[in-house]
Structures are given as C-alpha cells and as structure tokens.
Image (cartoon, rainbow, N blue to C red):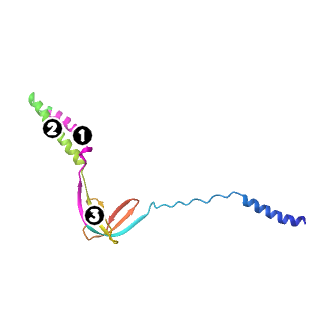
Amino acid sequence: MRTNIMRVVLPLSVSLLCACASQQPSPSVTMSTEGTTMVRSATVVNVRDVTVRGDNSQSSGLVSFAGAILGGIAGSKIGNGSGSVAASIGGALAGGMAGQHAEQSAATHSHTEVTVRFDNGDERTYSVDPGQDFRIGDAVQVTATNAVTRLSR
C-alpha cells in the first residue's frame, strides 16, 4: 500500500511544484510603420517654377555692416584730404549696399512645384529641384518613405 501511495503522491507533488514554478514572460512584440514605403501612380497636371525670397525682417544686417566698414576703409585709401573723406563715405555706402544685396541673394532659392492627380482623383503639389524635368501629362510614381516623398517617372 505504501508503494501505491508513493505512486500517487510523487507525481502529484511534482505536478504541483511545476505549476508553482515561475515562467519567463513572453517577449513583447512592438509594431511599427517605420520604414514603410508607399508607391502611388499619378499624372502631372501642373508644373511651375517658384522663386522664394528671404524674409527681410530676419536679416541680421551684419553683412551690410561689414560691407560698409570694408568699403569705407577701401575708400579712405583713395585721394588726399577732403577727397579721401568723400571716397570713404562713397565706399561705405557702396559696401553697405553690396552687403545687403549679397545677404538677400543668399536668402533666395528656387524650386519647381509639380501638381499631380492620383488615380482616385486626389491632387497634391510637391516641391522638386529645378533641374528635374516634369511635363503636364507625364505619368509619375509618387514614393513616400519615412515622411520623404519623391516623384519619378
């Protein structure tokens, strides 16, 4: 009888001990759309070149100031007496104007806007480099990857 009890108690105790043992948690699964690429077909419906000038209110004036200083120094080397003073003033004015023009030119950039119509009728406008040649009626692929969109034929 003792053997029969051992045959029942031993497997039962092993089962209880296994049930109480801690198990490793399953690894968590993280879903992400990072790296997703979406390609859509579209047709070009409009192309236009755009030139954007920098905002003059954000101009520091530092380049104009430096141009005026350098122009004044260069002008002071011309002539003697009152001629040197006049040349300094003229050089400072010319240098300041040249500096202002250089600062505005650096803040100006050009790009091309291409408007496309998708197969479902939606229209979107994308900015592309001026060197890319798109024409109205071209069939294009719009590829979007990680918030970067590209147009290609």
Disc on res. 93: 2
- Marks 1 & 3, CB-CB < 8 Å contact: no
User: Nearer the observer, disc 2 or disc 1?
Assistant: 1
Disc on res. 114: 3
| Label 1: element kind | loop
Q: Name the residue beneath numbered marker 1.
A: 61
Residue stretch in magenta:
46-75
CA separation, marks 2 and 3?
42 Å
The crowd level at tag 2 (other Cα within 10 Å; few <14, some 14-19, many 20+) is: some
- Say what amino acid the circle numbered 2 marks: Leu
Residue 56 in which image quadrant: top left
First-in-chain label (2 vs 1):
1
- Say what amino acid the circle numbered 1 marks: Gly
48 left or right, relative to 34 = left
Image location (x, y in percent) of residue 139? 30, 71
**Residue toward you, 153 or 28:** 28
Of all residues, the one furthest to the front in this rendering is: 121
Residue 44 in which image quadrant: bottom left
> At 20% across and 38% down in the image, what residue appears?
67
